[in-house]
């Protein structure tokens, strides 16, 4: 039970840090929703959703860095860890600037798609990629080294700065541009702050006894990178495609109201995603040593189910009260959406956990299920979007099918181990 206690305690650290950061994040979203109004808030959230999809590489970079830094750190190969960190940082900076140049070349079609006439907020949003992407390397190193307190503190700093600067810049008249500029500055400062705890990981390479300990398998990392990138693409698209499609197909007020309700429902993901973040390096460490790790996975699954259902229960019992408290009465007319969107995020949280599990054990067959179901979801929403509730139900059905496929695939792969477990032989 030692690993279970470690999973619980580390998850608790990250969950507490995430909750504190989420308070600042939700105050930011709540106040921006109130100060900007539905139309401008819809514009802000659409740009943020687009950025999350564009910066998909960041999720892959974090996962790859976390996976291999966990291996190198647990093996005491600090020299190799330093070298990997330097190489990753250099290439990610190059990638960030390349993406920004491409986006700037496409700025007018992007703005037209979202019905945005002022290009300044779009340019500001794009600039956040510079520090946002490279910070993925730093966060991956911290999580791989299981520095969960430091990871939590950096997250709190970022959201607190975002809130304070956002209020200031919007209040003095910068509107959407001010809200987005607050995100850019907060990300930059937080990136610089990550170097403080990173120093403790990279400080001493005296434990390396041979030149081999300064080497890491570049070919293996490259081979792991492509399916990891595809996995990150699918996770981010699944999380954000609804806001983008709703912004495209529905009037600005409805799209902004949907974005506000969706933001509230995401509390489920913010509370449960730290469990996947803690599970990943723990399973990676055990897999590197050849130890069993099924208990870590199952307890992670249980924690996600319990945590997400508790929050969903609140959404079902008092949706209007929750919306009024977090975003104000101007969005309360859409209270009926919250329980169903909340259910969608319960399912997404489970899918996120299982996808992370498959990535850490290097079993990427799940990508085919994911891509197929996500494509079906996008096609269905594109064809059937007569109302927002219809869009939400398509999302819930799609995610239900996807989770069933993920968990069914796990059971099929582990059927022999499950049989031995119930026989008391495993």
Image (cartoon, rainbow, N blue to C red):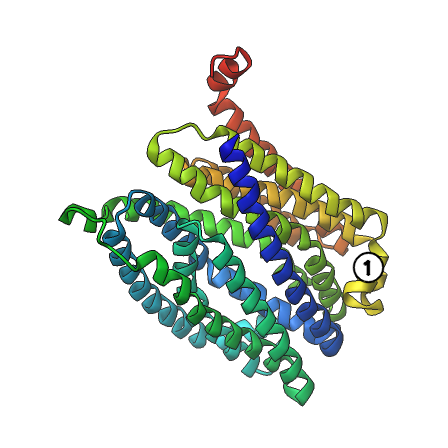
In the rendered image, residue 115, in percent from the top left (x then y), is placed at 63, 74
Is residue 241 at all visible to an observer of this figure? no
Badge 1 density bin: few <14, some 14–19, many ≥20, Cα 10 Å: some
Instruction: Give the vertical position of 317 relative to 88 (above or below).
Output: above
| 405 vs 269, nearest the viewer | 269
- Residue at horizontal 50%, vertical 49%? 234
Q: Quadrant of residue 89?
A: bottom left
In the rendered image, residue 345, in percent from the top left (x then y), is placed at 66, 48
Q: Quadrant of residue 251?
A: bottom right
| 204 vs 100, nearest the viewer | 204
Q: Secondary structure under badge 1?
A: helix
In the rendered image, residue 353, in percent from the top left (x then y), is placed at 54, 42
- Residue at horizontal 37%, vertical 72%? 97
| 406 vs 108, nearest the viewer | 406
The residue lying furthest to the left in this view is 211
Q: Which residue lies under the disc numbered 1?
A: 334
In the rendered image, residue 169, in percent from the top left (x then y), is placed at 63, 84
Q: Is residue 344 left or right of residue 141?
A: right
Is residue 179 at all visible to an observer of this figure? yes
Q: Quadrant of residue 422?
A: top right
| 72 vs 39, nearest the viewer | 72
Instruction: Give the vertical position of 180 relative to 300 (above or below).
Output: below
The residue lying furthest to the bottom in this view is 172
The mark total stands at: 1
């Amino acid at each position: 039970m030692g690993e279970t206690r470690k999973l619980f305690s580390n998850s608790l650290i990250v969950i507490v840090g995430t909750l504190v950061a989420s308070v600042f994040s939700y105050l930011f979203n709540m106040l921006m929703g109130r100060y900007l109004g539905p139309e401008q808030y819809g514009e802000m959230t659409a740009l943020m959703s687009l950025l999350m999809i564009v910066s998909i590489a960041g999720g892959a970079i974090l996962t790859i860095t976390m996976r291999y830094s966990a291996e190198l750190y647990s093996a005491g190969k600090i020299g190799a860890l330093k070298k990997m960190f330097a190489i990753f940082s250099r290439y990610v900076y190059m990638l960030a600037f390349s993406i920004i140049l491409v986006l700037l070349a496409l700025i007018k079609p992007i703005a037209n798609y979202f019905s945005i006439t002022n290009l300044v907020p779009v340019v500001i949003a794009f600039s956040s990629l510079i520090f946002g992407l490279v910070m993925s390397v730093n966060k991956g190193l911290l999580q791989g080294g299981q520095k969960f307190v430091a990871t939590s503190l950096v997250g709190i700093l970022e959201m607190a700065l975002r809130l304070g600067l956002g209020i200031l810049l919007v209040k003095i008249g910068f509107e959407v541009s001010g809200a987005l500029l607050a995100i850019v500055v907060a990300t930059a400062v937080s990136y610089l702050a990550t170097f403080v705890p990173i120093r403790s990981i990279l400080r001493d390479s005296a434990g390396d006894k041979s030149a081999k300990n300064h080497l890491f398998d570049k070919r293996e990392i490259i081979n792991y990178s492509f399916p990891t990138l595809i996995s990150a693409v699918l996770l981010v698209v699944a999380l954000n495609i609804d806001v983008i499609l709703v912004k495209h197909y529905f009037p600005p007020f409805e799209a902004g109201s949907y974005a506000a309700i969706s933001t509230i429902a995401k509390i489920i993901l913010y509370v449960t995603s730290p469990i996947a973040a803690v599970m990943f390096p723990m399973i990676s460490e055990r897999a590197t040593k050849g130890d069993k790790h099924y208990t870590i996975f199952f307890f992670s699954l249980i924690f996600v189910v319990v945590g997400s259902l508790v929050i969903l229960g609140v959404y079902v019992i008092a949706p209007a009260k929750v919306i009024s408290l977090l975003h104000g009465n101007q969005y309360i007319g859409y209270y009926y959406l919250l329980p169903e969107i909340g259910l969608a995020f319960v399912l997404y949280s489970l899918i996120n956990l299982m996808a992370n599990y498959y990535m850490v054990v290097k079993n990427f067959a799940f990508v085919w299920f994911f891509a197929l179901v996500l494509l079906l979801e996008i096609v269905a929403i594109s064809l059937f979007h007569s109302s927002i509730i219809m869009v939400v139900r398509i999302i819930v059905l799609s995610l239900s099918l996807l989770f069933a496929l993920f968990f069914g695939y796990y059971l099929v792969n582990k059927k022999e181990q499950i049989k031995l477990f119930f026989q008391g032989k495993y």
